[in-house]
Image: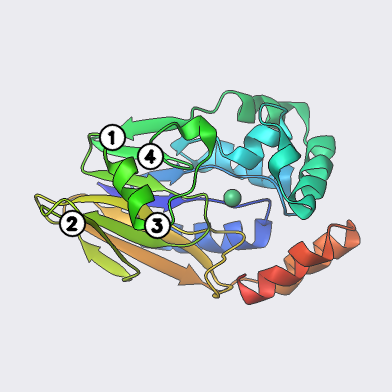
Amino acid sequence: MRYAIISDIHGNLAALEQVLKQIDETGVDQLVCLGDVVGYGPYPNECCEIIQDKADICLLGNHDSAAIGLTDAAYFNRYARSAIGWTARVLNEKNAAFLRQLPMTAVHQGLMFVHSSPLQPEEWNYVFTIDEAFDQFQSFEQQICFIGHSHIPIVWNLQESGFPKSSVALKVKIVKGCRYIINVGSVGQPRDDNPDACYGIFDDAQKIFSLHRIRYNVAQTQQAMRDLDLPVFLIDRLQFGK
Ligand code: ZN
């Protein structure tokens, strides 16, 4: 089975459309969205509708949760908070109801999926360091857990020695005896110094994970954000992938 795994769309319709077009051309069996469909970007309703229609699995992200009042946005930085306030105001009832019923985690055919991290996903913790990764490996039993949330693609590989190693390879062969936490990066707001939309493909038969980047019309999203008076910081960062 081939999975396309996308995350952190953040209302960036141009990025989402570009990614889905490429996924359609590639051909996959399952489309998995790891959450944060909304927040930051100018098209929360449109992105919700597309994901409702196309994703086989969709999980709840912290921005989705804040937009429907389930997570307190007080801990967000002021730009994120301002954008989530706007998102909550414009989100229609149908899309709010869609976000409200999203699960925090999913397991499909022996693969684990979560937005933030498998240990206490509702705490929205990040996996940045080797010890954070080590703790996370103790909290799920599958060989692979796919995550998003940090907007930075990375593969954590727990080897038989018991210590996780990180890599940013574009292609990873899944090896028996090793376990993996794979961050698929962000469709709508990459933060790894590369502004191109990011997502992953996992081929279960070949045991290969690959990371994909695709250019989209950043200027179009930025203009829509300007028209809506969304924070300049959020508009500018898109073109740098920061
Ligand atoms: Zn996010």
Secondary element at image label 1:
loop
CA gap, disc 1 and disc 2: 17 Å
Q: Given contact means CB atoms under 8 Å apart, are the residues at marks 1 and 4 in contact?
A: no
Closer to the N terminus: mark 1 or mark 3?
3
Q: Given contact means CB atoms under 8 Å apart, are the residues at marks 4 and 3 in contact?
A: no
Q: Position of residue 9 (x, y in %)?
A: 59, 52
- The answer to whether any part of residue 28 appears in the image is no
**How packed is label 2: few (under 14 Cα within 10 Å), some, or many (20 or more)?**
some
- The answer to whether any part of residue 108 appears in the image is yes
CA gap, disc 1 and disc 4: 10 Å
What number is the disc on residue 174? Answer: 2
Closer to the N terminus: mark 1 or mark 2?
1
Does residue 51 sit above or below 221 in this rendering?
above
Q: Quadrant of residue 212?
A: bottom left
Closer to the N terminus: mark 1 or mark 4?
4
**How packed is label 1: few (under 14 Cα within 10 Å), some, or many (20 or more)?**
few
Q: Position of residue 68 (x, y in %)?
A: 71, 29
Q: Which residue is mark 3?
A: 129
